[in-house]
Structure formats: structure tokens, C-alpha cells
Amino acid sequence: MNAAVDRDGALQALERELSVLLRRARAAQLEMARAVHPELESGAYGLLLRLEQVGPQRPTDLAAYFGVGKATMSRQLRSLKDLGLVTREPDPADGRAFLMTLTREGRRRFTGVREARRARYLSLMSAWDRSEVAELARLLHRLNEQSREV
């Protein structure tokens, strides 16, 4: 078989599988967001995840990380703040800026949902070798990093 045809077939398979994965991930993300708080938008779950992973962040840094505009990020953060899941604090490095951080309640709710999600992944991938899980994570990270550059 011709290498170009083989590569095209592989890219088509990748596109198909990513489409299925993303569709299922969006549905799961909405479910997880609603488990954190019934009024939480699905996209806001990723914000909670990011804040939990890296700690306090400037809204502009969050917008850049997720590849969204400042207005979209401001709206999502305002919603999270109104729900009592995040708080806005002055940035000690720059008095003109502020940082968003999880509240104690936000962290408690998020952690409970995350633990349930991890248990689900553990169940789904129980027959996988640890190296396969690590390789999948590595490749997805690589794809995500390159996607930020596009």
C-alpha cells in the first residue's frame, strides 16, 4: 500500500475516533459540571480543573490557556463566582490585577466529582497496561500542546 494512502487512512481513523471522543467528553463534562452545581455550565468544569491543578490564575492567563476571548472568560468566571465556587483576590505581584482561586466549597464539590470520574476511568481502563495509559496521556498532551499553536 502507498504510504500517502496509508497516512490518509490513519488520519481519517484519527478524525473519526476524536469526533466520538469529543462528543462523549462534552456530554460527560456537562454531567460532571451539573454534579458540581446544577447551574454550572459544562465549559466551566474545565476552569475548576485548571484552578485545582495550578492554583490561583489571572483571568487573562486562563483565557489564553483555553483559547477563548477575555469576554467569554469573564462571563464564565463571574458565573463561578456567583455560585460560590471561585473567589477573586488581588494579585500580590501586581496590585492592578487579580487572581481567581477555588473557594473551599468549590474545591470540595470539584474533588468529589473528580474522584467519581477517576473511578470511572479506572473501571474503563482496568484491562489496560499502565504503560498504555501513560502513552495515551503523553500523546494526548502532545496533541493538545500542538493544537494551542494552531
Image (cartoon, rainbow, N blue to C red):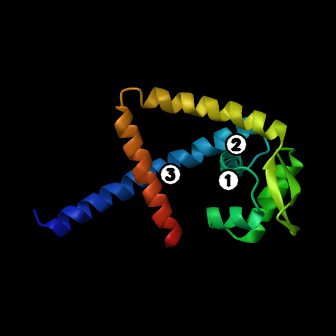
Q: Earlier in the sequence, mark 3 or mark 2?
A: 3
Give the amino acid type for the residue marked by disc 3 in the picture: Leu
Distance Cα–Cα, label 3 vs label 1: 13 Å
| Disc 1 element | helix
Q: Residues within 10 Å of mark 3 (few under 14, many from 20)?
A: few
Q: Residues within 10 Å of mark 2 (few under 14, many from 20)?
A: many
| Disc 3 element | helix
In the drawing, what numbered circle is on residue 33? 2
Which residue sits at x=76%, y=53%?
Answer: 56
In the drawing, what numbered circle is on residue 43? 1
- Residue 145 vs 105, above or below: the answer is below
In the drawing, what numbered circle is on residue 87? none
Q: Earlier in the sequence, mark 3 or mark 1?
A: 3
Q: Which residue is mark 3?
A: 22
Provide residue 27's location: percent of width, then percent of height.
58, 44
Which residue sits at x=37%, y=45%?
Answer: 135
